[in-house]
Image (spheres, helix red, strand yellow):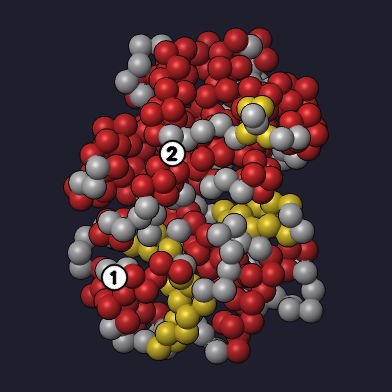
Amino acid sequence: MGQEIWSGGDWPDRLSAYLSAKGAKKLLLVCGRSYDGLCVRGKIEALPVERVRFSDFSPNPLYEDVCRGVERFRTEQCDAILAVGGGSAVDVAKCVKLYCKMDPARNYLEQDPADTGVPLIAMPTTAGTGSESTRFAVIYKDGVKQSVTHESIRPDVAVLEPAVLEKLPPYQRKCTMLDALCQGIESWWSVNSTQESKQYAHRAVRGIMENMNAYLAGDSGAAREIMLAANFAGQAINITQTTAPHAMSYKLTSLYKLPHGHAVAACLPEVWAYMLTHPENCVDRRGAGYLADTFADIARALGQDSPEAAVSALRELLAELGIAYPASRTREQDLETLAGSVNPTRLKNNPVALDTQTLRGLYERILKDEA
């Protein structure tokens, strides 16, 4: 059965009926620290089920955070999960669902995953990650990013309520929006792209570009469109997965404490610029000509006449938004760390081959010498 996506104001009634149909008696409410100030809190607390709150997790969730969530789910005998928050809350909720029936005496990451059948509802409070519509989650163990993937952790229901975006700080709005934009672009050029995924990617990129300025200025109608665009980006990467900019971003996030969207946005123009000048390294089975056409399509969706102009426009956009490239006091040491950190699986999704030496060169462009 496919995922249900609710974007209308009748979601409280629909959610009540959904939980009743599932026989749910007690929700594990996985929520971020912003939950208490959300305009939807009263509607959630009016739901006809008992709620157990879990907020004990980091902005970039740790394995240990998830373990605490699983223990809370079991101890309180919950039978459904509602995630309300950004990508971190949704990712924690996904992992709790996947791990809640595993052996707690063993490392959950090393056990065979299976569908636990626990209903999972996700209400994103940022417009960016698209996590509410993907089968992926990201957590960190011992400082290393762990990708958790299973079909069953795609939330059964995604509730899109743009009113929750009203109190987002400007910087967070920018970072999450840029994450969605990068997801749309990466999915579009991924070697795994399909006609369906490219339609989602196109809707994501166009939706963001057409509504960006109004959204950042606080327009509620634009907020709705950005939230939908971010969800389309999530649906796109659910099919294709992400590519090199995302693969390169994770260590930037952990090393420099950058928000995920900031780190990805710093990587993407540099990766695209490299790919434009190295078509001979195309690994997409559809060929270099197909890839050139794809780059041209993406550029047009970005409102530019050529891929080269699109790369320049993205760099200018980051400058206008105040999204700085990271600075490093220990640049040479960091370059080695970064180049060796990239997950080769994600690189296989990239349409142009990148080796370790190339990655180091890209990171050189991304990192700035700190004065």
> Where, by quadrant of the figure, is residue 341 drawn?
top right
Is 68 displayed left or right of 233 in the figure? right
* Residue at image coords 61%, 39%: 249
Q: Position of residue 57 (x, y in %)?
A: 58, 68
Count up the numbered dots: 2
Q: Position of residue 331 (x, y in %)?
A: 74, 31
Q: Are marks 2 and 1 in contact (CB under 8 Å)?
A: no
Q: Which amino acid does label 1 sit on?
A: Val
Q: Where is residue 160 in the image (x, y as percent from the top left)?
A: 31, 58
* Residue at image coords 36%, 38%: 204
Neighbours of disc 1 within 10 Å: few (<14), some (14-19), many (20+): some
Q: Where is residue 68 in the image (x, y as percent from the top left)?
A: 64, 77
Q: Identify the residue under disc 1.
A: 40
Q: What residue type is labelled 2?
A: Leu
194 or 277: nearer the viewer = 277
Please tell me which of labels 2 and 1 falls first in the chain: 1
156 or 207: nearer the viewer = 207
142 or 4: nearer the viewer = 142
Neighbours of disc 2 within 10 Å: few (<14), some (14-19), many (20+): many
Classify 71 as above or below 134.
below
Q: Looking at the figure, which quarter contains the N terminus?
A: bottom left
Is 91 displayed left or right of 202 in the figure? right
Residue 178, which numbered label?
A: 2
Classify 280 as above or below 13.
above
